[in-house]
Amino acid sequence: MIGRLHGELIQKTPGSALVDCGGVGYVCSISLTTYGLLPDEGCEVILYAETLLRENDLSLLGFASTQERSLYRLLVKVDGIGPKLALAALGAVSIEELISAIRGRDIKTLTRIPGVGKKTAEKICFELSEKLGGLTGLDGLSSDALPVNTWESDLRSALTNLGFREDAVIPLMAQFKQDKPPLSDAIRICLKALQR
């Protein structure tokens, strides 16, 4: 299995990159995020690779960072998300925005991804939000690269521990995304709204 390519970038397009490694040219499918981070053609490049082996096809995917590759690996574990749709998701929004949307169950942001409807967005949130709740132990994703939003997770945890359903809590949390008042104030405001 090929895990990393280090060589000369021969050609790049928004969907693929051709990398020469010791005289052998490897074509990788890439996301728009990776495309935006590639150097000029003729320059040295490093891509973190994922090998796809299917019945009649052997292909490579290339990622600009191990974080992007790790998120790709999580996305393709969701039923109905294949490599093509996972790459589209990684290119439609930034990695940080995608993780934040999954954690916050932000269906509106996820449905901006081409090919992702409401049901698929809900499935992504359901299957991955807990895995992305804390990034420790998640292969390749470090807390330095993708900070954990402890304020939001603490607020959600406090309200669900008080017995409120998560699907009722999350829409209320959205109103605090900009200003983020002290946690005690946010809990008090949410409790008033939930008890109406």
Image (cartoon, rainbow, N blue to C red):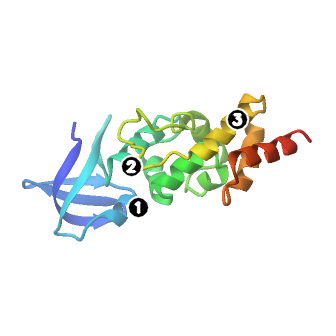
Q: Secondary structure at mark 1?
A: helix
Q: Which residue is mark 2?
A: 68
Q: Quadrant of residue 192?
A: top right
**Mark seen at residue 158:** 3
Mark pair 2, 1: CA separation = 12 Å
Q: Which mark is residue 144?
A: none
Marks 1,3: beta carbons within 8 A: no
Q: Is residue 102 above or below residue 10?
A: above
Which numbered disc, 3 or 2, marks the residue that appears first in the sequence?
A: 2
Badge 3 element: helix
Q: CA distance from mark 3 to mark 2?
A: 31 Å
Say whether marks 2 and 1 touch (CB < 8 Å): no
Percent across and percent down for residue 193 are 86, 45
Answer with left or right where residue 9 lies relative to residue 67: left
Residue at x 21%, y 41% (from the top left corner):
2
Q: CA distance from mark 1 to mark 3?
A: 38 Å
Q: Earlier in the sequence, mark 2 or mark 1?
A: 1
Q: Return the x and y of residue 126 as percentages of the image width and height.
A: 61, 35
Residue 130 on image: x %, y %:
56, 34
Give the position of the C terminus as an image quadrant: top right
Tell me which amino acid carries mark 2.
Glu
Where is residue 56? Give x, y as percent.
Answer: 30, 38
Label 1 or label 3, whichever comes before in sequence order: 1
Please name the amino acid that badge 1 sits on. Answer: Leu
User: Label 1 crowding class (10 Å Cα cut-off): few <14, some 14-19, many 20+?
Assistant: many
Quadrant for residue 8, please give it.
bottom left
Q: Mark 3 is on which residue type?
A: Ala
Of circles 3 and 2, the one toward us is: 3
Residue that mark 1 sits on:
32
Who's the residue at 64% across and 49% down the image? 106
Does any portion of residue 104 appear in the rendered image?
no
